[in-house]
Amino acid sequence: MSAVTERFLRYVRYDTQSQETSPTCPSTDKQKILGAALAEEMRTMGIVDAHMDEYGYVYGTIPGDPGLPSIGLIAHMDTSPDASGEHVRARVVPYQGEDICLNEQKGIYLRQQDYPNLKNHLGKHLIVTDGTTLLGADDKAGVAEIMTAAERILREGGRHATVKIGFTPDEEIGRGADKFDVRAFGADYAYTADGGPVGEIEYENFNAADARVKVHGLSIHPGSAKDKMVNAQLIAMEFQSLLPVQQRPEYTQGYEGFIHLTGMAGTVEAAELRYIVRDHDMEKFRAKKAVMQAAADFLNRKYGAGTVELEIEDSYFNMKSCIEPCMYVVERAKEAMRAVGMEPVEVPIRGGTDGARLSYMGLPCPNLCTGGENYHGRFEFIPVEDMELCVEMLVRMLRCC
């Protein structure tokens, strides 16, 4: 078993789900358990300054040639709250094109007809779940690949850049950069290892906002409700009906943005809708927020001022404007990809990454592939061979000069 595979299988046994409703940093204490283990493993490898801070961020340095840049490698330790990350049962399966039985007892299969991307991995060894949890390749694959590349650099020596390693909590809930100490990190530029299929490099992401709609109604006994009751749930439904249907995520792709209803709750007296708003283009992003404001204003004119409260909070912005002035960062990664047999493909991120916020904090930080697919769900998988190739890419990138 390769070093990166062994590490990955070990790391996914840690339950590190983040929790959006938690006010703390990290949002769950269990993330610190993996963080402490990583810091200790780094020290054992010879990274003498490896440590975890009070917020659960793990840092370490491998000194390099003073004539070469200081390059950061960053990955996040938490997994998505979208599916269970507890008691992950991962195993390696040779893939020859047949359906993969993940769980015979429950009749759960990973099928090519459902996931056509499987055909790209014929002959490889896939790490899969038992169909009851996510795998955690997002982003423990990135953690394992960085750790294995660091081990290689330490063992082999030779001329290489100074390596700044950073592992973050809470990326999956949009808070991975909240307490990241860019100045102390000390990198000239960095990369997040938090992408998908091999060859992908990303430096464009969504502009993002969270929106909350609160609707205030008036509850009256239905027997005497005529001309008196104001049903907050119905007004909430009316608000949703005023938003463009074609701007829902299920109708969009590529650079197209969306307004996505993520949660709803309510009674006659009070109702709440929760949304995320996304677009790569800043003007279209602002237009989507304006559409939501117009819907709220319309309903307040119809039902009375204060009936609908709309709160919109920006989360992060497209890193493209931060990366374009220093495209040599992207070119270095592409050079390393080509050197190990990858074909670089620039793709827009239909989501966010720690790198987006870090780029706005003064640390240019494109996103690199890790090899995983079907993230955030029970059918997540990652090929062993692709993880190994990503390690080679990272090592080559640190040695490029």
Image (cartoon, rainbow, N blue to C red):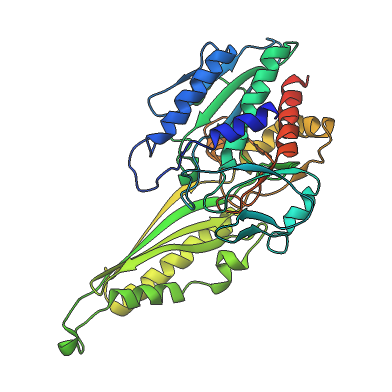
The count of marks equals: 0
In the rendered view, would you say 367 is above or below 48? below
Q: Position of residue 165 (x, y in %)?
A: 57, 23
329 vs 256: above or below? above
Q: Quadrant of residue 151?
A: top right
Vertical position of residue 268 compared to residue 182: above or below: below
Side of 111 relative to 344 (left or right): left
Is any part of residue 348 visible from this angle? yes
Name the quarter where the N terminus is drawn: top right
**Which image quarter holds the C terminus?**
top right
As drawn, 223 above or below 71: below
Q: Position of residue 249 (x, y in %)?
A: 57, 64
Query: x and y percent of residue 90 in the render?
Result: 59, 42
Q: Nearer the viewer, residue 50 or 73?
A: 50
Question: Where does the image place residue 193, in percent across and percent down from the top left?
Answer: 63, 35
Q: Residue at x 75, y 30 (%)?
A: 393
- In the displayed structure, does residue 245 sit left or right of residue 93? left
Residue 387 is left or right of residue 270, and the answer is right
Q: Tell which of 225 and 17 is nearer to you.
A: 17
Query: Can residue 364 be seen by looking at this rendering?
Result: no
Query: Looking at the image, which residue sits at the far front?
Result: 105
- Say whether residue 146 is left or right of residue 295: right
The image quadrant of residue 303 is bottom left
Q: Residue at x 65, y 20 (%)?
A: 150
Q: Quadrant of residue 238?
A: bottom left
